[in-house]
Amino acid sequence: MTTHATHMRGSSHRAYLELPWGQVHHRRAGDPDGPALVIVHQSPLSSATYEPAMAALGAHGLNVVAIDIPGFGMSDATPEQWSIPDYAGALWEIVDALGLQKVHLLGQHTGAIISAEATRQKRDRVLSLIFQGIPLYSDEERVKKAEGYAPGYTPAIDGSHLKVIWDRVRWLYPTISAESASRQVAEYLSVGPDYGVAYRAVFAHKPDIAAVADVPTLLLHGSEDVLDRMNDVVTAAFPHAPLVRIPGGTDFVAEEQPEVFADSVAAHVLAHAAAPKPKFTPVYTATVEVTGGRAGRARSTTGALDVKLTRPAERTEGDTGTDPEELFAAGYAACFASALGVAERRKRVTAGPVTVTASVTLGTRPGGTYGIAARLVVSAPECPQEVLEELVAITHTVCPYSNAVRGNIAVITEANGTS
């Protein structure tokens, strides 16, 4: 809503932490027992950038924490000029003070550089990374930026410095709303005349990309983000990281398109989440009794299911027996198709007629054990391919079968829409 974009408050829970250098302001939303997502904003702004998306992220079951970097927003300033390793070390002190263990880090611009360094420092505590624009400057660019990118301002009794800040914001982001620009002026003022303190740390720091190369990473930003120009450099540095560009979004896509932003972030986090704490509310229980194993019979207590089971290798022509893999495939396909309907409602789109075909394969693993793998083919001939792929990604976060097997078995998904 517009009211969220015009000030630094919001509807998420806000609080302060007491750290050695001062107080740190942060926002929280979502499930305290869910996967922990820590958001680190760009400078010289604040966590208010993410306020409109906090509820949408929390609705996916995430434990969302957006911090104000020390010296920015409503957090106390650092006692001296900090380096990026200093900011990263402070981030871990903040995470510890929040009582979090393993986390997912989402960093934008300056926040992305801090998140990358924090991951280098404590790789074992980072489950995944999301870079909402990471400035991988060349040595020449860093020198040039350091010379005059953030000149600061001098407070003037006639208020002319406010126009200086306003003009800078409009120069950087010419298409954003007046409400968003107004909030940014307040954020600049909250830092003070020397708003370039974190910029200096960025320009003096060369990220160690090799140290975080094995971390599951998502590159996510609006198509109009000022760092969209660096896609070639960034994708070359992170060749295994998918790049998601949200059409029409600026640096502030989290407030412009909060639901779209949250869906993409949550899909990545949930795909790389650690095993969640037990939290389960029963809705329905099916009970099936099997006698005779794979060559026996399966009967449900309701009587609706009463089928003969046959080992695939022993099946003969005319044999009507089924097997556990067919039953699992039927359940997965049916559940996924229904969950896709939830995704349609969430995105306010219609996919048209949808067919889900599930294949479940039984196989052997090293050491003589058995395992299964699944493949889903989602066909929607009336749905644009790009829309269908987005719906399928959301569906995997909703479908209980996908949630149950995530991290345990391989699931390949193919989406067939219209080009």
Image (spheres, rainbow, N blue to C red):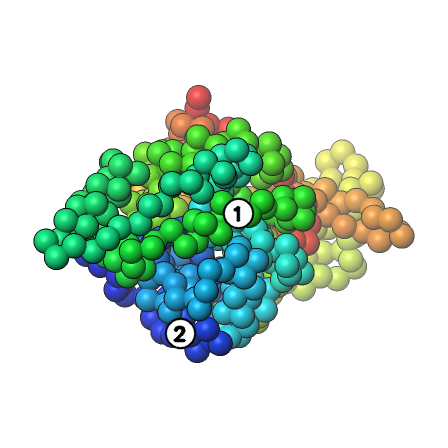
Residue holding disc 2? 23
The answer to which of marks 2 and 1 sits earlier in the sequence is 2
The residue lying at 79 percent from left, 37 percent from top is 316
Work out whether residue 120 can be spotted. Answer: yes
Residue found at x 51% / y 64%: 91
Tell whether 190 sits left or right of 17: left
Which amino acid, by three-letter code, is at mark 1? Answer: Ala
Q: Residue furthest top?
A: 419
- Picture coordinates of residue 205, whole percent (x, y): 55, 48
| Callout 1 secondary element | loop
Residue bearing the label numbered 1: 204
Callout 2 crowding tier (Cα within 10 Å): few <14, some 14–19, many ≥20: some
Alpha-carbon span between mark 2 and mark 1: 26 Å
Residue 95 visible? The answer is no
Q: Going 67% across and 44% down the picture, which residue do you hit?
A: 210
Above or below: residue 366 compared with residue 279: above
Q: Is residue 212 left or right of residue 350?
A: right
